Image: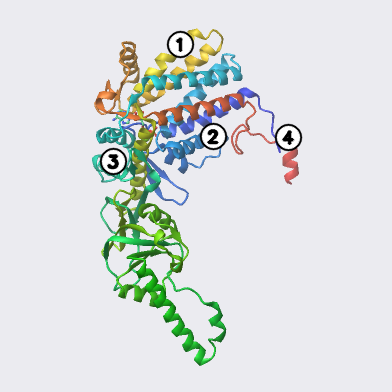
């Protein structure tokens, strides 16, 4: 295939790549920050998606360009790593790319650019450690601040940001033990229906379903509980099968079955079991007898059995007959017939379920995304133990420190470091622009503040001013920023070096040779 492509000179490739990158960066730039705008997109199925989330914007764009795919890769990597900071990562990558092109124009070798960017990245990472502020995992106000920064400007429909932030903090508290957070123990239960938007946090698990028999107890507190990853049924006795075709045999079979069921129910009751969770179907007769003995049994999906196991401290069993006292978990079960769900919880054991309801799927999804942004950010801050000033304050400070260090590098990489510093400033610049401020004025003001040693001063978009972000409580996890800078650096360096990158099919610089056309005929 490649011999059919006209040889593009590397400048053409770079220019093309740069243009493609611009287009993508421009699509997300206006969403940055609390005063960022929503984007309205139409997806492949004609559905309208309204979002303020950079990653979502990119996912909805049908991107064919290799550059676009790389940038989308950044967004996905950032999301899978830390959830927040995608727009920041994309913007930085775009600026670093444009900067790289200018450096190439000035005759700087791609390898030098790659090395310079990497050097800048390492320097900036060290400085991040220096300017980070300790985060106290026991301080719920600090958690609220982080959650607020992560959800600013995000579409929440009719749920207020304070409600969202409080739900996030409550959720995180429900999965924290001894200062350690396990976000895997958060279950989200989404439902779309003819209902007002609501978010609720429930301790433990919330499971769609109903008791296996109507006579079963609705509430079992202080329950000893078994969790099965199979059906609720009496043990099979395969050799009886052979004789069930004669009348006598069939009766015998049913009697045996009743006996087996009785034995099983006695055995289960003997262990002190008050409740059983199982997957798939239940044997009616067994369910009836369990109900008679006041044992609750409920059907949940397979992944939820694992969640239940953790919440209750039980073991997962293949079937009821294998149960021993060691397999029992402990907790409380409540069945809500109005909602058709069970709430299962256990004191001191982490695990929460957040129910999110709304009338429109997009709204529920956006709410889910915002909640995840908030809980992930809190989780990151706790893990890091440190936070950074938001509002572009950190980027201004990093740029300034990088500029002051650049002269120490006496070769051409000095220019590359300066380019890197300018790219960092794209974040505060974009925040001021989205706030309707004069970016030039604001940037001068920010630089002056930082030159005077006010290292936390950033953009306050709502008031259209610059202010101390730490005092305002606009802080974000260190790892979010560090990762965004890492990814942007990596991808910009790859693209700068790749002067042979082939643009996507159908783009204007792809030229087919005459032989190819001849082949087609
Ligand atoms: P990203 O996808 O990069 O997280 P966002 O749209 O969430 O993009 O914007 C994040 C930027 O907005 C960060 O630089 C953050 O510091 C800033 N930000 C968030 N809340 C505020 C606020 N209240 N005041 C100033 N800046 C804020
Ligand atoms: Mg964000």
Q: What separation in Å lies between label 1 and label 4 (alpha carbons)? A: 46 Å
**Above or below for 302 versus 55:** below
Query: Label 1 belongs to which residue?
Result: 405
Mark in front: 1 vs 2: 1
N-terminal of the pair, mark 3 or mark 1, is 3
Please tell me whether mark 1 or mark 4 is closer to you in this view: 1
Q: Which mark is residue 70?
A: 2
Q: Nearer the viewer, mark 2 or mark 4?
A: 2
SS category of the residue bearing label 2? helix
Single out the mark in the foreground, 4 or 3. Answer: 3
Which numbered disc, 3 or 2, marks the residue closer to the eye?
3
The residue beneath circle 4 is 3
Q: Are marks 1 and 4 in contact (CB under 8 Å)?
A: no
- Tag 1's secondary structure? helix
The residue closer to the viewer here, 138 or 514, is: 138
In what quadrant does ligand 2 lie? top left
Residue visible at 30% across and 63% down?
340
Q: CA distance from mark 4 to mark 3?
A: 58 Å
Give the mark, 4 or 3, whose residue is nearer the N terminus.
Answer: 4
**Residue 265: x percent and y percent?**
38, 73
Element type where label 4 sits in the image: helix
How many angstroms separate mark 2 from mark 4 (CA)? 24 Å
| Residue, disc 3 | 169
Cα separation, mark 3 vs mark 2, equals 34 Å
- Say how the picture is coloured: rainbow
Is residue 436 visible to the viewer in this orientation of the structure?
yes
């Amino acid at each position: 295939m490649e011999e059919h492509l006209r040889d593009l000179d590397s400048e053409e490739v770079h220019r093309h790549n740069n243009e493609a990158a611009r287009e993508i960066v421009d699509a997300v730039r206006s969403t940055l920050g609390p005063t960022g705008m929503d984007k309205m997109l139409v997806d492949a199925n004609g559905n309208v998606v309204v979002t303020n989330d950079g990653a979502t914007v990119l996912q909805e764009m049908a991107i064919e360009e290799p550059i676009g795919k790389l940038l989308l890769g950044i967004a996905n990597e950032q999301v899978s790593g830390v959830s927040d900071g995608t727009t920041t990562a994309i913007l930085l990558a775009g600026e670093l790319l444009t900067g790289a092109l200018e450096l190439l124009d000035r005759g700087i070798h791609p390898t030098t650019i790659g090395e310079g960017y990497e050097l800048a990245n390492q320097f900036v990472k060290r400085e991040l450690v220096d300017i980070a502020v300790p985060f106290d995992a026991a301080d719920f106000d600090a958690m609220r601040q982080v959650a607020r920064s992560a959800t600013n400007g995000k579409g929440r429909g009719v749920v207020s940001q304070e409600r969202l932030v409080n739900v996030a903090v409550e959720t995180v508290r429900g999965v924290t033990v001894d200062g350690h957070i396990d976000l895997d123990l958060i279950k989200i239960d989404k439902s779309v229906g003819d209902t007002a938007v609501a978010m609720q946090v429930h301790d433990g698990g919330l499971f769609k379903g109903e008791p296996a028999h109507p006579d079963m107890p609705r509430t079992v507190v202080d329950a000893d509980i078994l969790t099965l990853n199979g059906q609720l049924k009496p043990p099979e006795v395969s050799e009886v099968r052979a004789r069930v075709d004669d009348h006598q045999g069939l009766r015998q079979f049913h009697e045996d079955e009743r006996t087996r069921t009785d034995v099983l129910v006695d055995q289960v009751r003997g262990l002190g079991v008050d409740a059983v969770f199982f997957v798939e179907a239940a044997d009616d007769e067994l369910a009836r007898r369990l109900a008679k003995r006041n044992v609750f049994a409920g059907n949940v999906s397979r992944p939820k059995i694992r969640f239940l196991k953790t919440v209750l401290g039980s073991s997962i069993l293949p079937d009821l007959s294998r149960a021993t006292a060691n397999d029992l978990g402990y907790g409380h079960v409540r069945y809500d017939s109005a909602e058709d769900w069970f709430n299962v919880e256990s004191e001191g054991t982490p695990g929460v379920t957040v129910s999110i309801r709304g009338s429109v799927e997009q709204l529920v999804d956006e709410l889910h995304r915002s909640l995840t942004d908030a809980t992930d950010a809190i989780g990151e801050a706790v893990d890091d133990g440190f936070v950074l000033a938001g509002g572009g304050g950190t980027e201004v400070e990093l740029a300034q420190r990088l500029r002051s260090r650049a002269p120490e590098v006496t070769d051409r990489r000095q220019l590359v470091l300066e380019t890197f510093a300018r790219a960092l400033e794209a974040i505060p610049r974009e925040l001021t622009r989205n706030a309707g401020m004069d970016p030039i004025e604001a940037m001068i003001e920010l630089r002056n503040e930082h030159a005077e040693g006010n290292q936390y001063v950033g953009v306050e978009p709502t008031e259209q001013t610059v202010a101390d972000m730490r005092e305002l409580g606009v802080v974000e996890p260190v790892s979010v920023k560090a990762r965004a800078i890492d990814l942007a650096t990596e991808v910009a360096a790859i693209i700068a070096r790749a002067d042979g990158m082939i643009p996507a099919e159908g783009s204007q610089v792809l030229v087919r040779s005459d032989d190819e056309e001849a082949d087609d005929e």
